[in-house]
Image (tube, rainbow, N blue to C red):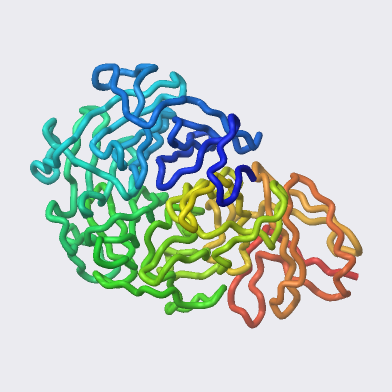
Amino acid sequence: MRGTYGVCDPTPNEPPCGYAFAHWADTAGQFWVNVSDGLWKYNVQANTWSHVHPSGIMSNIQAPLGVYDSLNTPGYVLNGAYTWTTSDDVLWLYGGIGGCTLFWKYSIALDQWAWMGTYTLPNYGIKGVPDSTNSPGCMGESNAAWVDDAGDLWMFGSGDPGNSMWKYEMASGWWTWMSGSNNFDAGSYGMIGVPSINDYPSSRWTNFYWKDDSGDFWVGLGFNGGYIATDIWRFDPVTLEWTWMSGSPNAASCTPSGVACDTTQANHPGGRFENRTMWRISDKLIITYAGKTCTGYYNDLWAYLPLQSIWVKLDDYSISGHYGTLGVPSSLDYPRYRIGAAGFKDRSNNLWVYSGWTFGSMGNDLWRYELDWHCIPYSASGINDEFAEPVVSLYPNPVFSSATLELDGNYSAAVLRIFNAIGEQVWWQPISARSTTISLEELRRDLFLPLDQPCPDLGERKVGARVMALAVLA
């Protein structure tokens, strides 16, 4: 979409490249990155970058604790920093190399930073007890960070590396050690799938995390300095119980296993680290791209299905990438492999990748990926619960040569997929307008199934737009 591949080629209208830099999405769905010359915003609709808040590489504190000031700046922090976006459109930042003990917030409305604390040495205090002297210490190489339903901030891991869970209470401005260990240990693995307040993950640096619709936090994969992890955990911030959900305890499965679209339990991406480009599509579907295993770097795309605790490989690309025409979608194009990139998701569930480290260099290229659903089981297809209801109508029906497809409600995009009577996909087309006329003349005369009906002999429902009637082509 933007930038130059394999070259750090900033212009007045584009940010420089970066590795493991701080990034956010605001409440309006715009993307933000903090790189070597300050804070930039990407407007998805306009396909433009704006250099919102220029600054230097070094941090600069020019105001008292908690006070916004135009001269304040965190500088350029890299190698992982914890970031949060709160409902008042404030971007929060903790740690990262270059400022691993510093805590900041940025007001989008004011265009100013406020210094929120310096936590030079860790001080755990008493588990579960807030105190003004509690301190997480130096944090980096991770971004396992969540905002809970009350608006407080949480983070897991980091340290050397660590496996403690910390909470920052907005009302008091104090940190609390909530769970996990203060000794960077091997964790406590109980029974898989069984919540326990005594269980917790092993120490690690990781960027594979999300929050589900019930308010629980998920975290997994990552690197602990000795091995690259495969396990995934769920944490309940109310009961403080951890649940070991999948993967192996304290052991690496180095090499990815499986072929595209295989949904067997043997499928897995291997122990994975530096896969900062990951996205939550829904509680049913998590996507992660690229990263490093103990056997090397991979340029692949994986889906994790939390409800089934299984992995599905969506695609496997050459590490050298394929660059076609800038701004023109193509099934033949894909980025070069990379680590330490920024991943974003827009309001249409397109996935975005910016910059990162590749082949010993960095580029400032920006990519958009339109999710291909054909490998993903129907059980993971819901982007939101409302997609369970009919949102698409097709007429006339029967169809003789062309038909009109209309999206119902506030949906901006869909994919029409048509399957024959034995469940084979015979036609598909992306739909981006509320009303679209489609030609089906190339299909032979046959009976075709609607997309929300069970496919005979397959025992599952197919992914796509919800067309709630049979289409008989004559």
> Along the horizontal axis of the image, is 428 left or right of 13?
right
Q: Which quadrant would the N terminus be assigned to in this image?
A: top right
Left or right of 315? Residue 140 is left
Q: Nearer the viewer, residue 279 or 458?
A: 279
| In the depicted structure, whether residue 57 falls above or below residue 220 | above
**Which quarter of the figure is the C terminus placed in?**
bottom right
Query: Where is residue 138 shown, x and y percent of the image?
Result: 22, 42
Q: Quadrant of residue 333?
A: bottom right
Q: Of all residues shown, which one is farthest toward the left?
A: 126
Q: In the picture shown, does residue 315 fall above or below 103?
A: below
> What residue is at 35 percent from the left and 47 percent from the top?
79
The percent position of residue 42, horizontal first and vertical second, equals: 56, 35
Residue drawn at 57 percent across, 41 percent down: 9
Quarter of image, res 123: top left
- Residue sitting at 48 percent across and 39 percent down? 25
Residue 35 lies, with reference to residue 70, above or below; the image says: below
In the shown orientation, is residue 324 left or right of residue 337? Answer: right
| In the image, residue 73 above or below residue 93 | above
User: Which residue lies at the image location 62% right of the left edge and 79% below the top edge?
Assistant: 458
What is the total number of numbered labels drawn onto the structure image? Answer: 0
Q: Is residue 287 visible?
A: no
Residue 301 point in image, percent of width and height = 52, 63
298, 57: nearer the viewer: 57
Check the image and name the residue furthest to the bottom. 457
Pick whichever, 296 or 390, lies toward us. Answer: 296
Q: Is residue 414 visible?
A: yes
Picture coordinates of residue 154, whole percent (x, y): 28, 43
